[in-house]
Every structure is written in C-alpha cells, then in structure tokens.
Image (cartoon, helix red, strand yellow):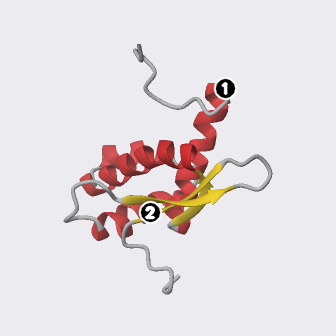
Amino acid sequence: MRHLNGYRKLGRKSAHRKAMLRNMATSLVLHERIDTTVQKAKEVRSLVEKMITLGKRGDLHARRQADSFFFDDAAVAKVFSGLASRFKDRNGGYTRILKRGFRVGDSADLATIEFVDFDAKGK
C-alpha cells in the first residue's frame, strides 16, 4: 500500500532535499526555464505553482510566505509583479515538463521545466 508516500525523497536527507527544491524553484522563477531530471522537475512543479498562486493572491501574508520560501528577493518580486499578472486568467497549470532523453553518465531521465508562456526566442 502507498500510505504516507506522498512525495519523492530523491535519495537525500530532508534538509538537503528541501534546500535543493527551494533553490530549483528560485532558479525557475528567475530564469523561467531549467534543465534537470524528470523526478526533480515533477517535485519542483508543485512548489512553483503554489508560489504563483500566492502571487496571484497578492496580500501581505502571501508575500511573507513567499519571502520565507525563496532564497532571492528578486524571485519574490518577480512572482508578485510579473508572473502573477501573466497568469491572472489561468487556474493552475503554469509550468510544463518536456522530456529530453537520457543523461550520458548514469542514464537518468532528463527534462526541461519551463513556464507555459515561455518564449525561447524572446529570452
């Protein structure tokens, strides 16, 4: 049975995993696209989408929650100013995961996670 197995442990201790996912979420917000493994992308997707929902809420408590999560103040500002206005008419599903094949060294599944309205030509 799968009781209480609600997330991927990614072979790391809890503090390392939390810091890694927060760092990846900060990088995704700042750069709007990152390359990682499929499992890490699936984990960071839920965190980033929760932060964008906080940005759409826009009140002081939501800003303080996002500020305690992100490692960079620029990421908080981008979520509350840029991304919240871009996704104001969208009810979830702000990111997409594109599978890219396998890593050469250990044959891990690689993926790119990006925002749905990401324009590669404009960046």
Q: Nearer the viewer, mark 2 or mark 1?
A: 1
Crowding near the residue tagged with mark 2, few <14, some 14–19, many ≥20 C-alpha atoms within 10 Å: some
Quarter residue 4 falls in: top left
Residue drawn at (50%, 67%) of the image: 32
According to the image, label 1 marks what residue? 13
Q: Position of residue 99 (x, y in %)?
A: 53, 59
Q: Position of residue 35 (x, y in %)?
A: 61, 60
Residue drawn at (76%, 46%) of the image: 106
Type of the residue with mark 2: Ala
According to the image, label 2 marks what residue? 77
- What label does residue 64 carry, if any? none
- Between the residue at mark 2 and the residue at mark 1, the CA separation in whole angstroms equals 30 Å
Of mark 2 and mark 1, the one earlier in the sequence is 1
Q: Is residue 4 above or below residue 62?
A: above
Q: Residue furthest right?
A: 105
Q: Residue furthest bottom?
A: 121
Using the image as rendered, state which of residue 26 and residue 121 is in the foreground: 121
Using the image as rendered, state which of residue 16 and residue 95 is in the foreground: 95
Please identify the quadrant where the N terminus is shown: top left
Using the image as rendered, state which of residue 63 and residue 101 is in the foreground: 101
Disc 1 secondary structure class: loop
Type of the residue with mark 1: Lys
Crowding near the residue tagged with mark 1, few <14, some 14–19, many ≥20 C-alpha atoms within 10 Å: few
Disc 2 secondary structure class: helix
Quarter residue 111 falls in: bottom right
Q: Position of residue 66 (x, y in %)?
A: 42, 47
